[in-house]
Amino acid sequence: MLRLTSEEEEMAGGARGKAAEKAMDLLIRYANALGAERFVETNNVAGVPGSAHQWLKDQYKNDGGDYRAVFCKFDLDANEVFDIPVMTGNACHLQGGMDPELWREQGYSPEAFANAESDEKNTAALNIRNLKTCTPYLAGNEPKFGEHCAWMESSAVVYCNSVLGARTNTEGRESTSAAMITHRIPDWGFHRDEFRLGDHLVEVDVRVNDIFEWGMLGYYIGEIVQEEIPVIDGAISNAGLIELKHFGAAAASSGGVEMYHLVGVTPEAPVREKAFGGKTIKSRIRYGADERRKTYENLNIRGKSTDVDYVMLGCPHAAIDQLETAARLLDGKKLNDGTALWIFTSRYVKTQAQAKGYVDVIKKAGGLVMTDTCSAIAQSIPKGTKVAALDSAKQTHYLPAFMGIEAWFGTTEDCINAALSGKWQGELS
Ligand code: F3S
């Protein structure tokens, strides 16, 4: 039975304005569907409020067909259109559909860009930060340990819960838009201690030490545990930000992992016992040489031709160190004629990379550094692409399925070599 505080009662009753009333109505329906007994307060919300392609706006042409109509009727599921108040808390916009400068290269029309630009102005006017990334934690929104958040984007959610020890479920557009207005989200799932304990033990006995290896490990584990919580122990090393970013994204794409524990690494797993918190271990999973090889073969199952015409890096959006690596590998070289290289990152990180000269080096070699989106989200690849090379297990999972292309998965170096030679030569050492 859901209980409301007096402030929540006021919002639901309309005393704090129409937007709060409708947002609360949506959240109450959501909480009741989940069986939540109360809400938690949140001041950290990451979603995609109000943004829409023109075709969605056209569905609301009788209501004005604009940002406001989409926010009220689509996001908040309301039956009328009203003013959205300026947000008073920490609200940010995750990745969108196109780069603000390189949208032509991505194949967008001037009309589509004008629509996106207009949405962005509306978002900014509501005091929502346009971080435009799947890695808000690399762009100025890093929640504190234990903080209740309401985030969308599976790779960000798993990072938020596991690495930062903050608390969020994988929210949707509707719940995040409503939470921006009310600062409430149902007290359910990962907001509660008992939901955050491990289910499965994964014992690793091959060395896992870079994004290639961490991506494969995540992909392997996600397929087995699906939406449950793995506790990983063993030969794990070098578990830095970039490695964990790739690990979590992979586990969230082959399965639906929203939280994991790495014994001795992540904050809620100083030791194995603490990660399980007395819960019975459901299964013991081993990741050794055989499992590693099978995962590599599985990820490369859609690679046939070794002629590579597109290399995509930056899924999840590249950190500054990854752009430094790409610039170092490309310095003074030229891409193969007929092979494109697009590297995706956030605006925040791109600005840093520009200051350090990495963007120029990549550009001189023939590559592009893009922001705000990625090939899978935008469903945008260079014209004529038949074969891609990727260093992200997550992108390898999605891109061939979305775009009907072949894809190779390998190390960042394998991918850059493919961009320079036009040939895939990656193999498992
Ligand atoms: Fe980010 Fe796109 Fe990957 S939005 S996590 S780069 S699929």
Image (tube, rainbow, N blue to C red):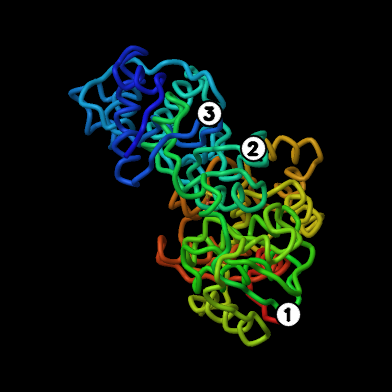
**Circles 2 and 1: CB distance less than 8 Å?**
no
For label 2, the SS is loop
Mark 1 — residue?
206
Residue of label 3: 91
In the rendered view, tell whether residue 353 sits above or below residue 238: above
Q: Nearer the viewer, mark 2 or mark 3?
A: 2
Location of residue 208 with respect to 398 vertically, above or below: below
Q: Is residue 405 left or right of residue 216?
A: left
Looking at mark 3, is its residue's CB closer than 8 Å to ligand 1?
no
Q: Residues within 10 Å of mark 3 (few under 14, many from 20)?
A: many
- The relative height of residue 357 versus residue 309 in the rendered view (above or below) is above
Name the kind of residue labelled 1 in the image: Val
Label 1 environment density (alpha carbons within 10 Å; few <14, some 14–19, many ≥20): some
Q: Which residue is located at x 73 percent, y 72 percent? A: 208
Q: Residue 250: x percent and y percent?
A: 56, 63
The amino acid sitting under disc 2 is: Pro
Residue, disc 2 = 143
Residue at image coords 69%, 77%: 204
